[in-house]
Amino acid sequence: MPAVPAQVADLRAALLAWYDDHRRTLAWRSDPGAAPDPYRVWLSEVMLQQTTTAHATPYFRAFTTRWPTVSDLAAAEDGEVMAAWAGLGYYARARNLLACARAVADGHDGVFPDTETGLLALPGVGAYTAAAVAAIAFERPANVVDGNVERVMARLFAVEVPLPAAKPELWRLAGSLVAGDRPGDWAQALMDLGATVCRPGRPLCERCPLTEWCAGFQSGQPDRYPLKAAKVERPRRRGVAWVLRDDQGRVALVRRPAKGLLGGMLGLPTSEWSANPDHMPPATAEWRDAGSVDHVFTHFALTLDVRAGEGGGEFVWTVVDDALASLPTVFRKALERGLA
DNA sequence: TAAGCGTGGGC
DNA sequence: TGCCCAAGCTT
């Protein structure tokens, strides 16, 4: 088992060799041997938090084209960055991204801290991201543990404790495999293995370089791991969204409060979202029932009844194309419904 | 500590 | 359709 140091060395060599042959080509990944740009590493890691590589890739390209350095990003206006993030989700990331860029630009002369501890002090940088940037950008032997690595460890060691209680154990096991040789490649190798071979469902064990050390594989049921605690049910809420247009064809938007759901983003005026919401319109108009849209958030599902009308009032009046490009998805869907 | 926080794709 | 999941962080 990998607790024996000589076998850890063999396991590490096997995975690093696999990575040399099978590493994914990703927009933020520098070529082998090339020096990584800490700004791009950090930006990609924040975008990839709970987000697929496919979804993050066009955003990464857009951000790095528009803001090539951390100082460029730090100088951007809040609304520009929030609009550029629209559709990517978890909008607190965008607020923290800007706060972090400004902290680096103003407090560190535009240079990212090169230690895990220094990185951890930055807004929006938690245990995972600090370790990932330290390893990938600065070749620090950090213990980089994301959902992929947790799954790989749970299978490799056949951990019988369900998530999330198993996290401390999974982190300890991952740490037992970290060494000073190629820390950045090691972290990315584990994540690539988890993403492409040691997948959540139907793992491709026949392609895995680690089966000879893998207790999950040897159990015959690798996909039984990681065990998971029973999940809570997701309630459904309802609400009303109003698509109000003026005589120039612009649409009425509101800036949402800085904190909480969709915080800091533009949105349509809506009722509260609850089991039995009120439906007092935000303006006087002949309201037309435009149907409804459904949207699923992490902890509740929402049905939004859409009403459309023409009028005026104190709003952020926005041309429709700009609104469609800068709204969170739930409002983009409601707006499209209201325009139909 | 556990809950709050988005979205899109796969099956 | 509904459920699962994705390079988690904050409070």
Image (cartoon, coloured by chain):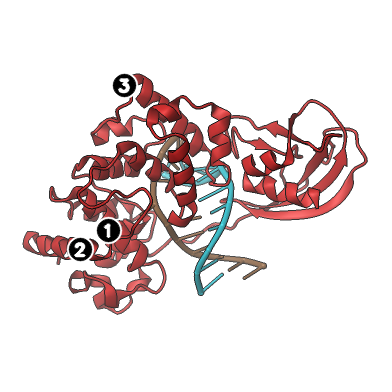
Chain colours: A red, B cyan, C brown
Residue count near mark 2 (Cα–Cα under 10 Å), binned few <14, some 14–19, many ≥20? some
Q: Which residue is mark 1?
A: A190
Q: Which residue is mark 3?
A: A109
Q: Is residue A272 above or below residue A18?
A: above
Marks 2 and 3 on same chain: yes
Q: Which residue is mark 2?
A: A15
Q: Is residue A107 visible?
A: yes
Foreground residue, A148 or A233?
A148
Residue A324: x and y in percent read: 67, 44
The amino acid beneath tag 1 is Leu
Distance in Å between CA atoms under marks 2 and 3: 37 Å
A22 horizontally vs A326: left or right: left
Q: Earlier in the sequence, mark 2 or mark 1?
A: 2
Chain under label 3? A
Q: Residue furthest right?
A: A286
Marks 1 and 3 on same chain: yes
Residue A267: x and y in percent read: 68, 38
Disc 2, disc 3: CB below 8 Å? Answer: no
Distance in Å between CA atoms under marks 1 and 3: 33 Å
Q: Residue at x 52, y 43 (%)?
A: A90
Q: Which mark is residue A124?
A: none
Residue A297: x and y in percent read: 60, 51
